[in-house]
Amino acid sequence: MTMRKKMLAFTLLSLTLMLLACGERNDPFTPTRPMIGGQAVPAANQAHDLEPEPLLEGNRAPAALPPGDFPVAMAIRDLVPVSAPVNKSGLLRHDRKGIHFEAYDGSSIAIPYRLPRDMPPPTLPPTGRLELYDLSNIGGARMKILLTDDSEQPLFVHIWETSRVPMDIQIGQDLRLIQLPPANQVEPGHFPATLAIIEHGRTLGNIAPGQTAMLQTSAGTISVTPEISVLTVPAPGVQDPDYPHYILRAWVTGGLPPVDGRDSGQLQTRGNNMQAVPANQ
Amino acid sequence: MRSGLRAAPMIAALLGIFALTGCLGKDPDPGGRVFRPGELPTGGIFDAGKAYPRQVIAVSSTPNEQLELVWDPDLSTERKLTGDKFNRYIQIPTDATPGIHYVSIKQPGAPDRMAQVTVLPPAPMPYPNPRIEDVAITNFSVTGVAQEAEVCTETTQEMIDSIRGGSDSLDPKFGRKYEDQTGQYSPETGTFCRTEPVAAFLKATIFITITNADADAGITISQTGDHKNVEITQTDLFSALPSREIHSRIPETYGYPVFHAVQFRVDVEGLESGAEYNIRAMNNPKRNDPDDGGRKHRSDQLVFTVPSSPDRVDSDNDRLSDVVEERLRAEGLPADPMHKTIFVEADFLNTAIPDENIWPIAKRVFSNAPILNPDGSPGISLFVDHGQDRGGSGPFNRGGAIPVGLPFLGLDSCVWISPVIPICSTLRDLKKTHFDPERREIFHYAVFGSLSPGGSGGQGIIGGWDFVVTSWRDASWNGEDGIDAKAAVFVHELGHNLTLEHSGRPSIDTGDDKQFESPWTPNTPSIMSYRWQIDGIDRDCDFKPDRVITFSQGMYKDFDEAKLSERDGVCDNRPADINGDDKIAEDPPTSANEFWACEVTDNGCDKDTDDIHRDGNQWGAVAFRPLEPLCTIGEPNCRSWFGERK
């Protein structure tokens, strides 16, 4: 036998050994008792771990108003919705996309919005003050955007809040929105809460939910819409500490031209204007 | 050619080595701890991962009674491991020292293999008591009559004739004849009465999932009232779910650290249909530390009721009876009586169509649920019909967009927004026209809308079948590392349908000495909590969200507002900015941030900051949701265990 043949024979022997070894180990875990009472014994489970969700593809979309034609407003800074409280003075600008606020410290905030139908958009002076927060969560809205001029008169206000007591919200110097408790609030149900506009302690007008009113204040004309203003009384036995509660979703625009022939406090109302109009139309 | 000749011996030698040590194409060591059923290697030493003393972990993927598992082979601490009859799981010895250990896996006629386990230092705390998560009863057979009762029914001449099979007139002979055989007819009252069996003695199999149970834990089952123990004929460790999550935690900083869950398959005899039973588990006292104060290591008692009718059997406790799941399966739906399944139909108002990516997110949340099914596998199968099969032949063709353009959506009422012009839809109304009644109490019904009047992201009925998702904010609402808000809201509201509240257990107001449900508990790591609802729960105890959507397992210690220390944090001894003022303080001011303080440190905003908050086992509540076990025999879908009445 030549050397080459010896080597080939050794190689073949090795291969045979290897195959035999593999054959011996073939499927050593074949269940010997695969069924208990007609049910297969399951394989071992992988250990449990918490898995973070992957980041949204492409990071995330720039913040924008949701689709639809319903009234809505939001505050956006650096393409992200603003939630932390802001209280700053700065420059104001208004265009098709909404309001642009540039604070004197250099930061800027965009406020795109769609108003309830027939509400006029605000007329903005060059400067003003912005106070806002949006601490809304899955449980409910907690949101306020309050834009005033340098004399603290309202230019653009959006309130969306819930509260265990009727809300009393200052929207300008000596100018407040006050929810009036409904007369019948004992029975379970939903009760419309009229919104009173008070200036210097004097009622300028009472507005029912769903109505839009033009009001002459001592400093100018404003338009007010309590889109939702309601007291919710739960059924007996409901232990939820959040009930009963009031909801207020209201809009105010200011800097408007005077209402013809009307004195301060006189109302001009329009009914149910819940279809939205885009900014600056 | 020459070089080839020279290389031949070397190749041959290498092949010989392969022959002696393993096989080409088979990896003797997977080189990692992550394995799935069926993926464990069949040779060599593999890394079974880390484990705490007394933790149950998997060392072999496939059940095999012929294996022998030996801990620390050839060392003075060598011992044969007992536990899993099918040799898939081992329980690490209580006295195992920290460091690397080996488990030899011997099989007659096959080479030994080794599993390497890195034992972690034991947590300086008493080992937690077992906690029963789920009790699933199945595989019934009737063994006898447990109870009889006289059952009377009104009859007519026609019925009597039918029973007799002829048209003889009613006479005393008939009454006597029937009385002699199966009952008594009374012509005066027009009733036919006979004694019938109404409750059965049953033989059954019970799958009991118990967190932190020893592999050889004891189980007792006794009937409520007489406390007589049920005869257990066989107990096997059927499945287990080790926790890897606990390896990155500091167990002693938790109130109830979860190391593993074990599922026992228990065969019992003498269960009475319709009767209530107590079940309790006790860990093996021999495994206890000698200095643990003589604790009894018993679980709390869990009460379950045996179905009064075969129609009420719900083997996997998912509130879909086995009869219904078999029917659904026959209709092409992916139901399984032995694996928890949740069906949801999702419709969308045309201003609120969600992104497609929310469905796989929601599915993952439930498939990764830390609970075990009667088939031994973990997780819950979630199927959402969002119209993906529309136009095709698949079963999920009812959900999807519906032509409603009103901006507001409520669950059951919204007329109060505007009494004149409708701007609001309700799920209640939409369900009448867009939900097939055949799906009632099989599919949950979800509707996506743009806004809810109060601005909530959604609403769900606790323990019900309906919920709305009204988060007008989309992914852009979230922070830099955000998850899709609608997916998180969807899971949250479905969680309400699955009986969950915002925390697992009510908080306590020590001032008023009352309990209350707080949605802001700092120590409930759950998507049900308002605190973690947007960007997922905090996984690493820094009190910041980590994009994990899940429910709580009830691991966290009580949180006492009056003893708030941000240096101690909430878990893992990690400081946490609990009051949200961007500082870490020993005794932080609760009013540091006007908007956060109330919700962050004073849950319920009652200004007294003396509330105690308690975590709760939400996944356990989801796991054990048995169908109402009792029904009245004779009513539709309520047969007797003894078959139809004759």
Image: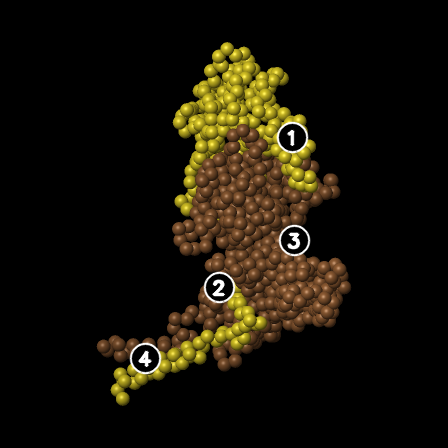
Chain colours: A yellow, B brown
Label 3 crowd bin: few (<14), some (14–19), many (20+), radius 10 Å: some
Going 43% across and 42% down the picture, which residue do you hit?
A60
- Looking at the image, residue B646 sits to the left or right of residue A223; the answer is right
Q: Could you tell me the amino acid type at mark 1?
A: Val
* Chain ID at mark 4: B
Quadrant of the image occupied by residue B16: bottom left
Q: In 3D space, how far apart are the residues under numbered discs 4 and 1 (Cα atoms)? A: 92 Å
Residue B470 seen in this snapshot: yes
Q: Which tag is nearer the camera, tag 4 or tag 2? A: 2
Q: Is residue A233 above or below residue B184?
A: above
Q: Work out whether residue A260 or residue B502 is closer to the camera in this orientation and state it.
A: A260
Label 2 crowd bin: few (<14), some (14–19), many (20+), radius 10 Å: few
Q: Could you tell me the amino acid type at mark 3?
A: Gly
The tag on residue B9 is 4
Q: Which residue is mark 1?
A: A165
Q: In 3D space, how far apart are the residues under numbered discs 3 and 2 (Cα atoms)? A: 30 Å
Q: Which residue is mark 3?
A: B255
The mark that comes first in sequence, 3 or 4, is: 4
Asked if marks 4 and 2 touch (Cβ < 8 Å), the reply is no
Q: Which tag is nearer the camera, tag 2 or tag 1? A: 1
Asked if marks 4 and 1 touch (Cβ < 8 Å), the reply is no
Q: Which tag is nearer the camera, tag 3 or tag 4? A: 3
Asked if marks 3 and 2 touch (Cβ < 8 Å), the reply is no
Q: Which tag is nearer the camera, tag 4 or tag 1? A: 1
Q: Could you tell me the amino acid type at mark 4?
A: Pro
Q: Could you tell me the amino acid type at mark 2?
A: Arg
x and y percentages locating residue B211 in the rendered image: 62, 60
Quadrant of the image occupied by residue B355: top left
Label 4 crowd bin: few (<14), some (14–19), many (20+), radius 10 Å: some
The tag on residue B319 is none
Residues indicated by labels 3 and 4 sit on the same polypeptide chain: yes
Residues indicated by labels 1 and 3 sit on the same polypeptide chain: no
